[in-house]
Amino acid sequence: MSDNAYTPPKVWSWENQSGGKFTSINRPIAGPTHDKDLPVGQHPLQLYSLATPNGVKVTVMLEELLERGIAGAEYDAYPIRIMEGDQFGSGFVDANPNSKIPALVDHSMAPPLRVFESGSILLYLADKFGAFIPEDVAGRTECLSWLFWQMGSAPLLGGGFGHFYAYAPEKLEYPINRYTMEVKRQLDVLDRQLAKHTYIAGEEYTIADMAIWPWYGALVKNKVYDAAEFLDAGSYTHVVRWADQIAQRPAVRRGRMVNRTWGEPSQQLHERHAAEDFQTRTQDKLNPEEAEKA
């Protein structure tokens, strides 16, 4: 046993910050910390988010709907700067009582309808516009199974592996080994599925791909946690093939930009209100190879 072994108290209390990158925004209580209304743009769909993997799911979905010519999917997107505590403003908490991005508010009905949790937003938009989800029972069920697989698996990748490998104040062998084993198992699940199918749920590109790609596509392409070599990510050849294939899609390249506030300036679009907003950036002029480097 380590000399630093921890003995939990009989009753836990929040006394000290735990350290790590996100310690300043972690707390054991819910609810708002300050009053702040959310802005509302001109379109019925209002998105409040950030270009983390969970946020990218939804902006990719919205851009894919627009790419398909579905005008009703036009949207305004406002950044929620989580490191600054925007998610604890009263307006955002009204939109998502869990204080996590993304949150969507649909003003096409009265009263406006809030939708929170990224998987719920993807399913809501797929059903609302009849796109990117199979219509037959078998296909829809397979798609939803993989959508919910992502909901259950990604916290072990992000809050588990990602936290202890990249963000914790010290690297501890047991949690890193535990979560590395699980993430590699998840990658093997995906690799075996993609060995048999073009996309996650079959031969059709769906919301399952949009949910899984921002996490696991980014992981194998070394876009999160700087862990691709550690995980031997290149050995999951079918996941890498799929990740590259999704990254080529114009709507995906645009969706990655929305509410992005870091990285190459040409890849950032802090707010999005119309398709013309992308013209102020170089994204649409980039070829896929250049976009992939960003």
Image (spheres, rainbow, N blue to C red):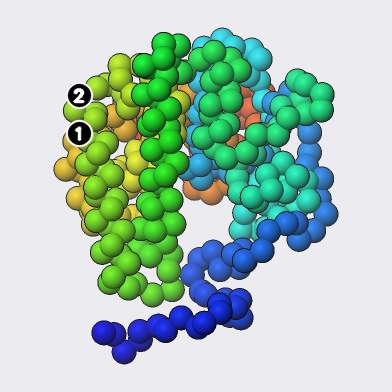
The residue sitting at 38% across, 45% down in the picture is 153
Asked if residue 187 lies left or right of residue 137, the reply is left
The residue sitting at 20% across, 33% down in the picture is 192
Residue that mark 1 sits on: 192
The residue sitting at 61% across, 17% down in the picture is 128
Tell me which corner region of the image, top left, top right, bottom left or bottom right, holds residue 51: top right
- The answer to whether residue 249 is seen in the rendering is no
Tell me which corner region of the image, top left, top right, bottom left or bottom right, holds residue 265: top right
Residue that mark 2 sits on: 196
From what the image shows, is residue 44 above or below residue 226? above
Q: Quadrant of the C terminus?
A: top left
Decide which of 231, 4 is in the foreground and name it: 4
Q: Do the residues labelled 2 and 1 touch (CB within 8 Å)?
A: yes
Alpha carbon separation for disc pair 2 and 1: 7 Å
Q: Position of residue 15 (x, y in %)?
A: 61, 81
From what the image shows, is residue 204 above or below residue 23? above
